[in-house]
Amino acid sequence: MILEIDRITMKFGTLAVLDDISFGVKEHSIHGVIGPNGSGKTTLFNVISRIYTPSAGEIRFAGNNIIPLRSHQLAKLGIARTFQLLRVFPSLTVLENLMLAMTPREKTTIIDDFLSTPRMNKQEAEMREQAYEVLKMIGLERKANNPTDGISVGQRRMLQLGLAIISKPRLLLLDECVAGLDPENVEKLVRLLQYFRNDLNITVLMVEHIMDVVLRVCDRITALDYGRLICEGTPGEVVENPDVIEAYLGKA
Ligand SMILES: Nc1ncnc2c1ncn2[C@@H]1O[C@H](COP(=O)(O)OP(=O)(O)OP(=O)(O)O)[C@@H](O)[C@H]1O
């Protein structure tokens, strides 16, 4: 298991929004967390991405407890996440934003920057090439030189994924990335997530409201209701689970 959620409880005041949750995410899999409104999905995402500190429990990534870490330290370990709002510089181009999200492999100094030395130029060319590869992958090659504020909702979502994987993470955390997409972009997203898993060996944990996408793309699914884990299994097992059916139908 690359990620182990071990007896996580999160209380706001006396209310346990997550109640003793445990499950594991297998390396090179797509794992979904589902649940009706208010079941605790976003809270769980915020605990894993180290925005909230849980009241009890441990989360281990590759065997190491990440609870003592802060959100910004996760990237160095190889954990990337998406944000509900696209965090970019709107007036910069799509390509420039991708290049900004990369960590330069070699250190350059301010003198290199200022004088545009061969070392600086070589590094920039490599970064540009890498950004183009990601643009191809997310289908935005033709938008490379467009200002980011001019691209469509679906394209922004793809860019969000591109920004998250450009640092080559081992684990990608996705927070409700399907909502608001038209059917064509949903298909693109599904193919992209499969590509991440199959070709880039990225493990994906997706917290998602939209059930049919999760059922199609996930290897395993964890279902929450009122902050409790009610079912863990394959998509086939989850759709047939009486507690899951009750949780969804009861609130329909
Ligand atoms: N900061 C907070 N303080 C108090 N209660 C909170 C806080 N954040 C969330 N909650 C409560 O925790 C419960 C779970 O909320 P959460 O947003 O995690 O659910 P969710 O499954 O993501 O719902 P949705 O699908 O609607 O996004 C809700 O009852 C919510 O009101």
Image (cartoon, rainbow, N blue to C red):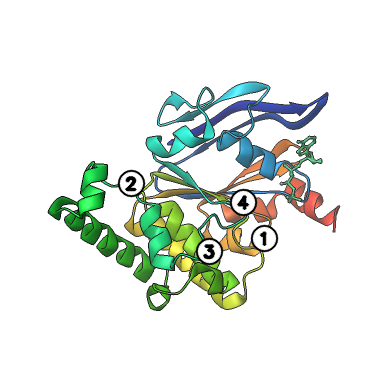
Look at the numbered disc 4 and say if its residue's Cβ is closer than 8 Å to ligand 1.
no
Between disc 2 and disc 3, the foreground one is 3
Badge 2 amino acid: Thr
Q: Helix, strand, or loop for circle 1?
A: loop
| Alpha carbon separation for disc pair 2 and 3 | 20 Å
Which residue is denoted by mark 4 in the rendering? Answer: 237
Front position in the image: 205 or 139: 139
* Residue at x 62%, y 75% (from the top left corner): 182
Which corner quadrant of the image does residue 17 belong to? top right
* Residue at x 33%, y 46% (from the top left corner): 103
Which residue is denoted by mark 1 in the rendering? Answer: 210
Front position in the image: 110 or 74: 110
Which residue is denoted by mark 2 in the rendering? Answer: 103
| 2 and 3 marks in contact (CB < 8 Å) | no
Does 199 appear above or below 65? below
Badge 1 amino acid: Ile
- Is tag 4's residue or tag 3's residue first in the polypeptide sequence? 3
Q: Residues within 10 Å of mark 3 (few under 14, many from 20)?
A: some
Quadrant containing the N terminus is top left
Q: Residues within 10 Å of mark 4 (few under 14, many from 20)?
A: some
| Alpha carbon separation for disc pair 4 and 3 | 43 Å
Q: Residues within 10 Å of mark 1 (few under 14, many from 20)?
A: some
- Is tag 2's residue or tag 3's residue first in the polypeptide sequence? 3
| 4 and 1 marks in contact (CB < 8 Å) | no
| Alpha carbon separation for disc pair 3 and 1 | 28 Å
Q: x, y percentage for residue 94?
A: 43, 67
Quadrant containing the C terminus is bottom right
Between disc 4 and disc 2, the foreground one is 2
Between disc 1 and disc 2, the foreground one is 2
